[in-house]
Image: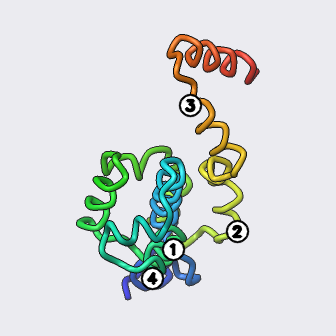
Amino acid sequence: MTSTTGGTRRRGRLADGNPDPVDVHVGLRMRLRRTLIGMSQEQLASALGITFQQVQKYERGTNRISASRLYQTSRTLGVPVSWFFDELSDAAAAASATPAVVAGEQEATDPDRRLLRRETMELVRAYYSINDVRLRRRLYEMAKAMRG
């Protein structure tokens, strides 16, 4: 165990036993990308040479993903490694360094949660199924204008 500002941390866990928020964020991004490209947990697991249960644990942040596995996953999902850290909130980054965040608070404030909704994924798939690039761009500009 290592000491962090008065508490103790077990490897990959906050002092209260919850997963590290950065691991949770990386897992959410893994799930987001996997679902956006229409890949099942079983397909990803097979491509990585692991069990689908291990993919589930990565996606929940229950298990940490090693650098080599993250690299392999990024290649399989067609994104750079840095993509898994995009949109990492300041709160998650700060909580990773300290044991101060409660899991429920993290889930409520994580902006990626709304990206994982079925409605969002269906909208993104429908958007990318528009073959006319100009029409797709017009829809994008309209949506930006409507967000207020």
Q: Is residue 141 above or below residue 74?
A: above
Mark 4 to mark 2 CA distance (whole Å): 19 Å
From this viewpoint, which residue is outermost toward the bottom?
1
- Residue, x 56% and y 84% (percent of image)? 17
The x and y percentages for residue 82 are: 34, 47
The x and y percentages for residue 141 are: 62, 15
Mark 1 to mark 2 CA distance (whole Å): 19 Å
Q: What residue type is labelled 4?
A: Arg
Q: Which amino acid does label 1 sit on?
A: Gln
Judge left or right: residue 80 versus residue 115: left
For mark 4, give the secondary structure: strand
Judge left or right: residue 71 versus residue 26: left
The x and y percentages for residue 9 are: 45, 82
For mark 2, give the secondary structure: helix
Tell me the tag on residue 56. 1
Q: Which amino acid does label 3 sit on?
A: Ser
Report the residue marked by disc 4: 9
Tell me the tag on residue 47. none
Report the residue marked by disc 3: 129
The quadrant of the rendering that contains the C terminus is top right
The x and y percentages for residue 28 are: 53, 59
- Residue, x 72% and y 45% (percent of image)? 119
Are the residues tagged 4 and 2 within 8 Å (C-beta)?
no
User: Which is nearer the N-term, disc 4 or disc 1?
Assistant: 4
- Along the line of sight, which residue is nearer the eye, 74 or 148? 74
Q: In this view, does 148 lie above or below 73?
A: above
